[in-house]
Amino acid sequence: MIACATSCSTYGLAGIPIRVEADIANGLPNFTVVGLTDRAIQEARERVRSAIRNSDFPFPAQRVTVNLAPAEVPKEGTGFDLAIAIAVLIADGRIGRADGAALVGELALGGAIRPVTGVLPMARCLAAHGVRRLIVASENAEEAALVDGLEVLAAPTLRACAAHLSGGRPLDRCRAPALLPAEQPPDVDLAAIRGQSAAKRALEIAAAGGHNVLMTGPPGAGKTMLAGAFPWLLPDLPVDHALEVAAIYSLRGALRERAATSLRPPFRAPHHSVSRAGLVGGGTGVALPGEISLAHRGVLFMDELCEFPRTHLEALRQPLEERRVTVVRARAAVTYPSEFMLVAAANPCPCGHLGDDQPCRCSPRLLQEYQSRLSGPIKDRIDLTMTVPRQQYAEIFDAAADEPSAIVRARVDAARARQHARQDALNSVLQGAELRARCRLGASASRLLARSGERLRLSARGFFRVLRVARTIADLAGDDAVGEDALAEAIRYRTGADA
Amino acid sequence: MRERTLLRGRAGWPERFEHLQQPPQRIWIAGSARPRLPAVAVVGSRLATPAGVDIARSIGRGLAGAGAQVISGMARGIDGAAHHGAVDGGGETIAVLGCGIDVCYPAEHARLRRAILTSGCVISEEPPGTPPLKHHFPKRNRLIAALAQAVVVVEATPNSGALSTARWAVDLGREVLAVPGSIRSPQSEGTNLLIRDGARPYLGFGDLLDALPELGPLLPLPIDAKSAEQRISHRLAPELAEILTRMGSTPVLPDELAATLGLSAAVVASRLGSLELEGAILSLPGGRVARTF
C-alpha cells in the first residue's frame, strides 16, 4: 500500500513542499529512503525504525521504500523524520491519514519529537502553497505560529501525533504570539555615555538616514559603547520585516539569541576572527546565512575593522551595494537578503594613539599603509566618518546635557517619516540624479558645495556622500531644502581619505 | 649636481666645525651654496602641529629675507617647513643630513631636496650611499649647532632630537630660542622646558633680532603673524569668527568647543565645516581641529 505525508525543505530563505511517499511491499525486510538525500536523511532510517518501535507500533517486517518528491531537489537535515515515520505508519495501516497536515520534526529514538532549524521559513512556504495545518515539535510551535493562516499543532511525541491523526486525543493548538513594540529599556542608553556630543550627533544622523558609519578613535575612547547604543536609536521593525529577520535566524538556528517575536532591529558584532563563510554565508551543501544576513534590517558592527582580513572586506562589497548576497556552493547557489547598516570602528593608526594625548609611535609608512587598509575596499560605501576622541576634560561636560536614547529616537523617527513621505526610501540609497532632485539647494548652498569640491578635492562619489548626509541633516531639522548649515555640517563627516 | 668632498684643514673647510671638540675629518657637500654667516638653525619635531609648521615656514622666510642662511635637518615636520620657508623667501638654506648626500630621506622630500640643491646645499659627514640610521642623527645635530649662530626650536616633544641640537648649541655658546606653547600640547613640552632652563622665548621675529643683532640692518618689514588672520577673519561671518577666537593655537576637540561656547554639537559641526571650507582650520587625525595660522 502507498501512503503520503507532506513535509518541507528549505532552499535559502525559500522553501519547497516535499511529498513523502512510503510503499510497503512483500520481500525481504528492508528500509530505503530515496530522493537526493544527504547523510542526515539516510540516518533517519535508524531513528524512524527505533521511534516507531518505541511508540508501541511494530515496524513492518517487509520491504519499505520511502521517496521524497520532487526527487530532483537536493534535501538535507533531520526535519523529515516525522513525516517519514507517519507515512510508514499510514502505509502499514496503523493510523488513518495525515489529513492535509504537514509534518516537520526530528525523531528521538524513544519517539520524542525534537525541534529543527528553519521551521519559520518552512511554515511561510507551506502556507503560501495552501497547506492549512502544520505539526511541529513543541519548541518550534511558537515560531511557526507567527505565520498567518496556518494552524500550528505542537506534538511532543510520535505517539501523540499518531493518536491525533487517528482521531484520538487532539494535539495542542499553538496561538500566534503577539509581535509587540519592545517596552524594554535600551541595553546601552546614550545618556549613560558622558560627553561625546559630536559622536552622538553623528550617530543620530546615521540612524536617521540609514548611513553606514566609520568611527575612528584611540582604544578605550568608547567606540564599542557608542556602537552598542546605536541600534536603540533605530525604530522598531514593521511586522513583515520582523518576520523576515526571524526567518533568517530560524534558518541559522539562532532564535535562541533573538526571540522570533522581537521587533527590534538585529545587532550583530562578529569578531574579526570570523571565517569568511561565517561572515557572508556558507557551509557545506546549501549555504546558510552569515552574519551579514543575520544583521538584515539591522546593524552589523565591525569592531577593529582593519583586523578583518582584506578578503572579508572585499566580500562585503557586493552585499553593501546590492543589499543581498549570493553564496555559491557545489550543490546550489542561494541568495540571502543583507540590508544592514554597517557600523565600523577602527583605531586611527596601528598603535592607536594618532592624534591622542599619548604620542603615536607609528612610522609614516606604516600609517600610510594602515590608512589605505582602512579606507580601501569599502570606503565608497561609508557615507559618514566620525572620530571618537578620548574625553579629556570630563569636568567641562554637563551631565544634564546627555540626552536619553528615547528622545534621540523620536527625532530619528520623525526624520525617517519625512524621507518615506518624500521618496519612500531612506536617504542612504539615493543615487545620482534622484539624489540631486531630492536635494534642492539654495543659491548660497550651491556655492558652498562647489567651493567644497575644489578645496577638499572631493571625488564624484565623495560629493554624493556629502550630499546624502546633508539631505539627512536637513530632514532632522525638518527642512525641505538643504541649507548651507546642513551642507557645512555634512562636510565634517566626509570620509577622511577624500580630504 | 656638484658633489665634493671637503677635508679638514684644506681649502673650503667650514671654520665653524673647529668649534666642536671632535670635529668631523671630512664632509660631503653638494649644491650651489657654501656655509657662511649669518646663519640660523630652525629645528623641531617631525610630528608637528599645523601652527608649528606655519611658524617654522614664516621664520624660514623671514631669515631668507634678512639674508641669513637657514640651516636644518630636512626631516618631516618643522625641519622641512623651515627649508620650504627659506626657499619661498628666495634665500639660501642648508640641509645637514644623517645619511649620504645622495640619499633622499624622507622620500617625500625629493622635490624640496632639489630646491635646496639649487639655492643652497646639502651636507653630510656620512659617505654617499649611507642609509639613514638612527645613531647618525645625534651626530648630525652637532653639525647643525656648529654651523648656526642661533638655534630656534619651534616645537619639540621631550625626547625630540631638536632638544639634542639645542644642547649642542648651548655647549658651543650659540643662542638658543624656543617657541613657547600650551602646557597641554605635547609638541610644546620640549620647547617650554627649554625656556624654563633659560632659553630665550621666541615670541616674534624681534626676539631673533635681539639675539643676533647682525641680522638687524638687513631685515625688511617685520613678519606680521596677525596679517593672515586678518586676511581670513575679516570676511568671516561673526559667528564663525567667534569660534576662531576661542580656538587658540593648540588643537581642540569639537566637543570641548561646544561645551565652552554652550552650543550644540550640530551647530559646532556646521560652523567648523564652514571654517574648514574657508581654509581657516584644519582637521587633524584623532578628531581635533586647529587654526591654520
Image: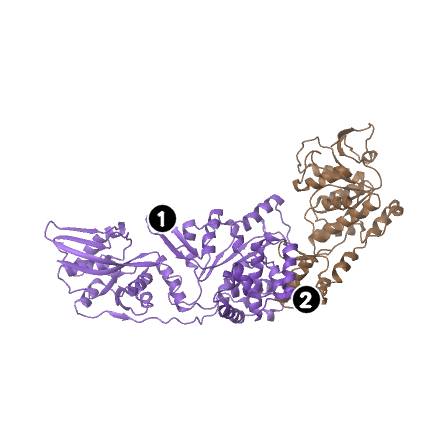
Q: Secondary structure at mark 1?
A: loop
Q: Please give the name of the residue rendered at 21% of the width and 62% of the height, measured from the top-left corner.
A: A158
List the residue tagged with mark 2.
B260
Residue B231: percent from left, percent from top: 76, 59
Color scheme of the displayed model: by chain
Query: Which colour is chain B painted?
Result: brown
Q: How many marks?
A: 2
Residue that protrudes farthest toward the right in the picture:
B217
| Disc on res. B91 | none
Mark 2–mark 1 Cα distance, whole angstroms, equals 58 Å
Query: Which colour is chain A painted?
Result: purple
Quadrant of residue B35 in the image? top right
| Disc on res. A329 | 1
Single out the mark in the foreground, 2 or 1.
1
User: From where the camera sits, is residue B193 visible?
Assistant: no
Chain of residue at mark 1: A
Between residue B165 and residue B1, name the one nearer to us.
Answer: B1
On the same chain, marks 2 and 1? The answer is: no
